[in-house]
Image: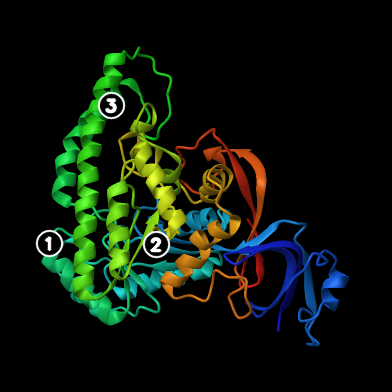
Amino acid sequence: MSNLLIYNARLVDENTDAYGALLVSNGKILSVCKSDFCTEASAVKLADGIFSDSADPVELFDAKGLVLTPAFIDLHVHLRYPGQTQKEDLNSGLHATAAGGFGTVVAMPNTNPVVSDAELALKIEKEAEEIGLTKVFQTVSLTKNFEGKDVSHLKEIDAKRIPVITEDGHDVLSSSVMLDAMKLAAEKGAVVSCHSEDPELALKAKPYRAAALEIMKIYGLSAWGHFVESEKEISPETFTEIDSNLTAANSLLAIAEDSATYRNILLAKEAGCHVHIAHCSTKNSIEIVRAAKKEGINVTCEVTPHHLALTGDTEPMIRALVNPPLRHEEDRLALIEALRDGTADVISTDHAPHTADDKAAGAPGFTGAETAFAVCNTVLVKEQGFTPQKLSQLMSANPARILGLKKGLLEPGYDADFALLDPEKRWKVRSADFKSKGKASPFEGEELIGKVQGLILDGKMISL
């Protein structure tokens, strides 16, 4: 038996914000002591209920006053494995998620090949386990090879090992096919995560984004929201042309999200499955989710750190290309309020690394695992008055519940996965220092508050 006593810690989960200590045994929390005196190992070991009577040795770890919180759980990452290892691979991706304080992540299936069968998904999970960092649940596509027709492969999945299925990267065009997939998910007990975006409206938006990109390439303008020095003088009229094209695209994509969110929730109601709406980004989609919850439909939803922190109303962030796009200020505020009142359940990163060339060519998405906590701590806790407990609920407890895991709380019997945080540390984002291969961050050069200082998984310290 291996025992670890963590003391001199500020214990934070959705129910707790108190100094104390906890005892870990064989990867599980054995007991918790919440008391100001838990700053000295000798005092902690005498505390009623915290000292183990076992003859096995107890390793001591002084948290030095740092926040000890359940490791974060991300329901939406792109590890780009297999087949896109120029963007990310399991090793770089899991070092990035570990550095971000994540103990568990759910990986999307839009890889090469598409993850469309249980055998490949379980193979990826096993390879990730051998790396010994963040635990990976690999999703399986809703339709075979993203072809939008065949869902028979879903009969093979075991929801305990593959708890989420998704067509992430786009949506299923046929409502009939989506309904069939959702009915199978209901039978299996799997969560259907929906990239809610009407495919035909998304196609209609493409020419506008392409037109903007052509101009951006001429002037060397970045596609991740930064002013870039250009050898060519850029006139106000040029910026207006770029922005008007992107505004037209984004307007269509907002309608695409809202209409698909409504459709997918209606289909889930009919199928009787748990539907999870990925990366909600509009005020209207939040209102649709809110109404569905009031009706008792089994729906959850997520928002991303970048949609909480940024808007695409003006230069240069209108050029920060991501799907869904950065929205208006009223949308951003609606997302924050949805987190506050429980309409939105979790924060997920949608970590989407790209090569520099792909990003310059307009590939949508940002690298987000290593900045997620700091962005959310800065925006939600420091600016919006959220409590640390609420943030822990959104990044740990609620995603654990969606996955059916005994994680996300500092309670006896729960998995001993913890992040060590300094919530006051100020630091400047330098993507060159990221563990991820992807360096495109819209927060490049920004000062954020809050830093992940350590990770403990299964009761063992992880080297970051």
Q: Gap in Å between the C-alphas at discs 2 and 3?
A: 33 Å
- Residue pictured at 49% horizontal, 60% vertical: 394
Q: Amino acid at mark 1?
A: Ser
- Looking at the rendered image, the disc whose residue lies closer to the viewer, 2 or 3, is 3
Q: Residues within 10 Å of mark 3 (few under 14, many from 20)?
A: many
Apparent side of residue 3 relative to residue 201 in the rendered image (left or right): right
In the rendered image, is residue 439 in sight?
yes
- Residue pictured at 70% horizontal, 63% vertical: 18
Label disc, if present, on residue 243 of the rendered structure: 3
Up-down relation of residue 97 to residue 411 (above or below): above
- Residue pictured at 23% horizontal, 26% vertical: 244
Which residue, given by chain and number where applicable, does mark 2 sit on?
Answer: 107
Which residue, given by chain and number where applicable, does mark 1 sit on?
Answer: 174
Q: Amino acid at mark 2?
A: Ala
- Looking at the rendered image, the disc whose residue lies closer to the viewer, 1 or 2, is 1
Q: Amino acid at mark 3?
A: Asp
Up-down relation of residue 219 to residue 455 (above or below): above
- Closer-to-camera residue (88/1): 1
Give coordinates of residue 81: x percent, y percent.
38, 59
- Closer-to-camera residue (278/148): 278
